[in-house]
Amino acid sequence: MSKSLAEQLLKAGLGDAKKLKNIKKEQHKARVQAGKNGTVVNEATLLAEQSRQQQVERDRLLNLQKKAEAEQKALAAQVKQLIEMNVISDKGDVGFNFTDQNKVKKIYVSDKVQQQLVKGQIAIARNGETYLLVPVQVAERIQQRVPEAVVLLNQKDEALDEDDPYADFKIPDDLMW
């Protein structure tokens, strides 16, 4: 059984030694010519190369996705650290209402902190499910990294409309309902 298929066919009388010699000669010529041209056209190698290219592209996209996720985690950790390091803890009995994702939320603060919130000197940031008070400078840094983390940041309106007929009638921000 160690004989090649060609030898087995010759022994069985199904082939001719002259034809076998010609076929081997043509195969040898094809190998020599392919070697001179530098390219061997083989469908299996083409498919293998194409498959390898597709795998490389999938790996590249997966790496980009993992890198983006790692950057998001790093930003979230930075925001959490900024909030925890700069938290203003001044609990009081005055309720301060604000909106978060179209829902009205209430946080209890002191009168002084309420005035600072209204004037825009203090901001409210979300850390997970809790709301914490932070200075405006910290809130601006947080907003640069993750804008959704800052819930309330009152800005001073420097540019008031000159033709505003209600300019003399200011709306108080500290109304209690």
Image: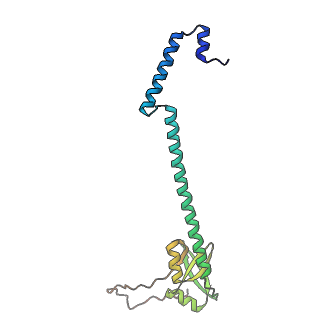
- Expressed as whole percent of the image width and height from the top left, the position of residue 36 reads 43, 31
Comparing 93 with 37, the one in front is 37
Q: Is residue 35 left or right of residue 11?
A: left
Position of 92 compared to 68: left or right?
right
Name the foreground residue: 157 vs 93: 157
163 is higher (above) or lower (below) than 33: below
Q: Position of residue 23 (x, y in %)?
A: 50, 17
Q: Position of residue 3 (x, y in %)?
A: 64, 17
In the picture as drawn, the residue positioned furthest to the top comes out as 13
Give the farthest residue toward the right.
Answer: 1
Please tell me in which quadrant of the rendered image residue 7 appears: top right
Q: How many marks?
A: 0
Q: Image quadrant for the C terminus?
A: bottom right
Residue displayed at 52% across by 57% down: 64
- Residue at point 61%, 87% (across, down): 109
Q: Quadrant of the N terminus?
A: top right
Q: Position of residue 143 (x, y in %)?
A: 51, 75
Which quadrant would residue 111 be assigned to in this image? bottom right
- Residue 75, compared with residue 82, is above or below; it is above
- 11 is higher (above) or lower (below) than 81: above
Q: In the image, is residue 20 above or below residue 114?
A: above
